Image (cartoon, rainbow, N blue to C red):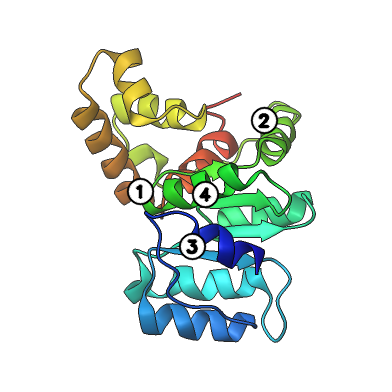
Amino acid sequence: MGLRALVRSDAGLELVGEAETGREAVALARSVTPDVVLMDIRMPELDGLAALREISADPALGGVHVVMLTTFELDEYVFAALQAGASGFMIKDSEPTELLRAIHAAASGEALMSPSVTRTVIETFAGRPAGAASEHPRLGELTEREREVLGLVGQGLNNAEIAERLWITKATARTHVSHIMLKLGARDRAQLVVIAYSSGLVR
């Protein structure tokens, strides 16, 4: 009820459906193809991660962005969700404005995570020993400029900030990010962040 009221409080958002189970969520996503799905990690019948994987694997739902919600910031949930294609990972007790920002960010292809979740991701990768990086098999397809852009995406920079850092236009930055996502088979920027860290481009 709280999430329903939150979504309806934003004139730029429209609530197009609700589901009680993971299985219902997948079926609903296929029937209405929403821009964004707020998915609880803990769902009956089919848990949120399994539902996320089904949505991510369906070519017809390529434009659907999933923001995961949980009461706990457990590491295994964070990484499993991001690797499965989540566009965000928010703690349920986040400020309402943060949840709304996550929805809008996901809808525009960006990624937003609770600050505590972001710290978990950074600390986990930063604490890995040298040589622990696992390079993405298609990373070699990127140009030097694209690798540079990927590293900046991994640092959390948006397109405008990347453009300013590299002295290029925002449109060029956006094009680079789109090409990188296409080459690496990434669903959105959240997955690019995971790839940047796991491949060792960001420390």
28 sits left or right of 197 in the view: left
- Mark 1 highlights which residue? 108
Tell me, for residue 100, which label it has, or none: 4
Q: Which residue is mark 2?
A: 131
The disc, 3 or 2, on the residue closer to the chain's N-terminal end is 3
Tag 4: residue type? Leu
Q: Are marks 2 and 1 in contact (CB under 8 Å)?
A: no
Question: What residue do we see at 72% from left, 82% from top?
Answer: 44
CA gap, disc 2 to disc 4?
39 Å
Q: Would you call the spot at circle 4 few (<14 residues within 10 Å), some (14-19), or many (20 or more)? A: some
- N-terminal of the pair, mark 3 or mark 4, is 3
**Circle 3 residues within 10 Å: few <14, some 14–19, many ≥20:** few
Q: Which numbered disc, 2 or 4, marks the residue that appears first in the sequence?
A: 4
For numbered disc 2, what is the local secondary structure? loop
Name the spot of residue 111 as percent of width and height, x first.
Answer: 48, 44
Residue at the spot of label 3 = 8
How far separated are the C-alphas under marks 3 and 2? 48 Å
Instruction: Estimate the x, y position of residue 123 in percent, counting from the top left.
Output: 73, 31
Residue at disc 4, secondary structure? helix
Regarding residue 185, the answer to whether it shows in the image is: no
**Which three-letter amino acid code belongs to the residue tagged 1?**
Ser
